[in-house]
Amino acid sequence: MTSITTNQEAGWYLGIDDESIYRTDKDILEELAEERLNPPLAAIHMSVDEVSYLKYHRYLTNVIDTDKRLVIWNDRGRKAAVLDTYYEAIGEQNCKKIESVALDGARTYISSTKKYAVNALVVLDRFHVTQKLNKAVDRVRKDELIKARINEDEELVALINCKQRFMLLKNKNKMTPKQTVTLAMLCEKNEPIYKAMLLKDSFLQLYSCKDIEEAENHLMNWLEQAFESSLEVFRDFAESILNKMQYLLNWFRRKISSAISEGFNNKIKRLKRMAYGYKDIEYFKLKIHCGR
């Protein structure tokens, strides 16, 4: 019952106080976890990502088996030492069997993976790259919105206010006819946003390349355009891509994605909301693993 409702509601239904429900549920989950997670499960293809479990930068690092689509390990924090704990727990031989690891680009996760999973292909995940690209576009929108308000340009404010932000983040082929017209008007009226959209569309064409050689050529040309642009946020984005270029291009060697991690993260956040938060983080981890 506690898998579909809160402990308090389950206690009300069963006529038991919620503290007793919590202790009973935790005991059951600990038994299940002992069976399923001791020793920790090893994966051949995996994804690593973090999810916030409390305010003020409190995170869980999640390890996902992308073949089984299963959370196989997690712990508090997102430093290299946290992920080191997982690799050390599965042992050197299992680490050597790991073929690919999808990451969001965090240096801590990259350094830990390269240290232990010595045969793994480290892949900078397409989902997170696109997410960061969209953040760059939205930063340009916000900067131009501030200028438009200062200049009292009501027409431009109407085109780039918060209600319009999703239009800029959408793929062009998914836009409505009205959004297409609005975007054309906006690009004609505002040069920085026009440049930002050109850079965004050009970058996304990377993932249509046939092979890694074509992708590398396309990326080098795009980086040159971004560095020569007048948009500081895109120059910063280009710098981060240049530093991790090999991991981005590895996507063309193995198209593994950590988008599944985002799916699990959304489920974890929903679990947290349903319970109105967890004071006992170990109990929260048990709920994530054992699906109750």
Image (cartoon, rainbow, N blue to C red):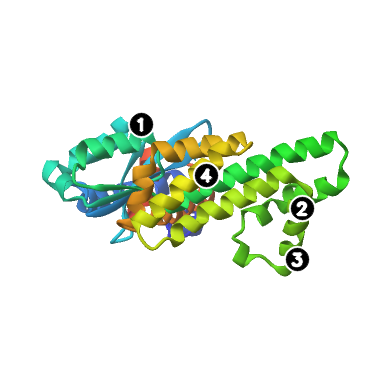
In the depicted view, which residue is nearer to us: 79 or 150? 150
Which quadrant is home to the N terminus?
bottom left
Task: Answer whether labels 3 and 1 touch (C-beta < 8 Å).
Answer: no
Q: Amino acid at mark 1?
A: Lys
Q: Earlier in the sequence, mark 3 or mark 1?
A: 1
Q: Residue at x 41, y 51 (%)?
A: 217
Q: Residues within 10 Å of mark 2 (few under 14, many from 20)?
A: few
Q: CA distance from mark 4 to mark 3?
A: 26 Å
Q: Which mark is residue 178?
A: 3
Q: Amino acid at mark 2?
A: Glu
Identify residue for label 1.
Answer: 79
Q: Amino acid at mark 3?
A: Lys
Q: Which mark is residue 132?
A: 4
Task: Answer whether labels 1 and 4 touch (C-beta < 8 Å).
Answer: no
Q: Earlier in the sequence, mark 4 or mark 3?
A: 4
Q: CA distance from mark 3 to mark 1?
A: 45 Å
Identify residue for label 2.
Answer: 188
Q: Earlier in the sequence, mark 2 or mark 4?
A: 4
Q: Which mark is residue 168?
A: none
Q: CA distance from mark 2 to mark 4?
A: 25 Å
**Residue 137: percent from left, percent from top:** 62, 45
Which quadrant is home to the C terminus?
bottom left
Task: Answer whether labels 3 and 2 touch (C-beta < 8 Å).
Answer: no
In the depicted view, which residue is nearer to us: 178 or 7? 178
Q: How many marks?
A: 4
Q: Earlier in the sequence, mark 1 or mark 2?
A: 1
Judged left or right of residue 171, residue 167 is: right
Q: Disc 3 on helix, strand or loop?
A: helix
Q: Earlier in the sequence, mark 1 or mark 4?
A: 1
Q: Nearer the viewer, mark 1 or mark 2?
A: 2
